[in-house]
């Protein structure tokens, strides 16, 4: 899967404080502003998660930005419509660089393709005509480029369509709209588009056995989880089994709707950027996926880990001839998902039962997928 889509907001002379406030409260990553309008950022305390991209049009403007220590420090990206300026600074800039190009005909389309292939960090593309065919052509001819392609849009309909173009879509959206409803809706759209879909399969239980005491990990997130969500956990990078969140009835204690009782400390948990991470490596602030019984995943933040000595249960399953396993706490209140999305207490699981699982291509180094010959048993 490609990296998560990014969402930018363009500030212009008509942008209201209310619009910027909504941006700060929503899933925006960067604000894009010209040097002429940079004064609008004065007095604003942007959240730490939001970075600044500054548009400059000449070397004189770039030097003016450098002369302003506060503005230079605040700017993570330097963006320009001036290709010759980029050519002057591309090999000596400490900032990430990007170009803006408006595609209005075949020559400008060809120029956009050339720029994407030219080792830029970001290319922001606007289109004169209301069609995504030029975007399709750019995506098709630059698939191997590391450059991130953002589309400049004025409304959420165009933004949403651009994220689905050629199935992979643009790497991000720059919203140029001061309509607060559009600001909020575009943030919702980008969050939905960043959800991964896992192909969950029927996992037939082949063995269940108590495995003694072990270090059991609970993953406490900063999000509220639903009854249809859990995490994919497995002993090997070949795949995992879907373990429920602590959102189901407990007769003797309150629910922990932020928690997944994950299992043995050695297990992998699946997360963003194609990573499967050891539970022992997780730390507060890391991201992991919560997955529902349909395979739809969203990234959540780890708030803490709770590691205690508990009796563990070894559960082995087979999916399409591949054996995978997990070690889960041996207790009725810890549940797994059955193949139809039902919940099954770990203490009641037996050979022949059908759970929900996921097959992955084996081979990991510090959680990152690599191509190598590997056998995990």
Image (spheres, rainbow, N blue to C red):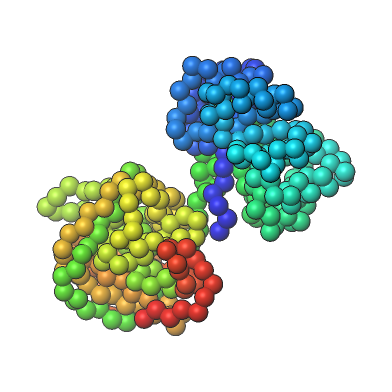
Residue 169 in sight: yes
| Residue 7 point in image, percent of width and height | 57, 38
Residue at position x 57%, y 46% from top?
A: 5
Q: Quadrant of the C terminus?
A: bottom left
Numbered-mark total: 0
Quadrant of res 367: bottom left
Residue at position x 78%, y 37% from top?
A: 83
Residue at position x 14%, y 53% from top?
A: 251
Quadrant of res 166: bottom right
Q: Is residue 286 above or below residue 32?
A: below
| Residue 134 point in image, percent of width and height | 78, 46
| Residue 266 point in image, percent of width and height | 30, 67
Is residue 321 left or right of 282 when viewed as pictured? right
Q: In this view, does 260 lie above or below 175?
A: below
Residue at position x 55%, y 58% from top?
A: 1
Viewer-closest of 80 and 49: 80
Q: Is residue 140 above or below residue 10?
A: below
Viewer-closest of 138 and 42: 42
Quadrant of res 212: bottom left
| Residue 71 point in image, percent of width and height | 56, 24
Q: Which residue is outermost to the left?
A: 252
Residue 153 in sight: no
């Amino acid at each position: 899967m490609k990296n998560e889509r990014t969402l930018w907001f363009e500030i212009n002379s008509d942008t209201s404080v209310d619009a910027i406030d909504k941006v700060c409260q929503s899933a925006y990553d960067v604000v894009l502003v010209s040097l002429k309008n940079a004064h609008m950022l004065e007095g604003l305390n942007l959240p730490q998660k939001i970075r600044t991209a500054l548009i400059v049009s000449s070397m004189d403007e770039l030097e003016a930005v450098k002369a302003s220590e506060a503005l230079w420090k605040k700017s993570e990206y330097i963006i320009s419509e001036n290709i010759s300026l980029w050519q002057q600074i591309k090999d000596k800039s400490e900032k990430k660089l990007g170009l803006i190009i408006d595609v209005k005909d075949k020559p400008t389309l060809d120029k956009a393709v050339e720029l994407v292939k030219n080792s830029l960090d970001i290319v922001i593309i606007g289109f004169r005509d209301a069609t995504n065919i030029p975007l399709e052509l750019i995506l098709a001819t630059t698939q191997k480029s590391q450059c991130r392609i953002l589309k400049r849009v004025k409304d959420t309909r165009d933004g949403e369509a651009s994220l689905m173009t050629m199935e992979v879509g643009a790497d991000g959206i720059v919203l140029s709209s001061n309509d607060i409803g559009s600001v909020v809706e575009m943030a919702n759209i980008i969050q939905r588009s960043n959800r991964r879909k896992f192909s969950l399969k029927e996992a037939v239980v082949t063995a269940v056995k108590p495995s003694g005491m072990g270090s059991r990990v609970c993953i406490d997130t900063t999000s509220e989880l639903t009854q249809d969500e859990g995490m994919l956990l497995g002993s090997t990078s070949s795949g995992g089994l879907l373990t429920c969140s602590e959102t189901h009835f407990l007769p003797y204690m309150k629910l922990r709707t932020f928690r997944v009782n994950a299992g043995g400390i050695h297990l992998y948990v699946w997360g963003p950027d194609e990573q499967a991470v050891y539970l022992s490596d997780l730390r507060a602030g890391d991201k992991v996926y919560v997955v529902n019984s349909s395979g739809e995943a969203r990234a959540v933040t780890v708030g803490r880990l709770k590691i205690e000595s508990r009796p563990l249960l070894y559960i082995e399953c087979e999916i399409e001839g591949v054996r995978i396993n997990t070690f889960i706490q041996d207790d009725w209140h810890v549940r797994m998902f059955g193949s139809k999305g039902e919940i099954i207490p770990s203490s009641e699981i037996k050979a022949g039962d059908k759970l929900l699982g996921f097959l992955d291509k084996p081979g990991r180094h510090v959680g990152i997928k690599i191509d190598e010959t590997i056998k995990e048993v």
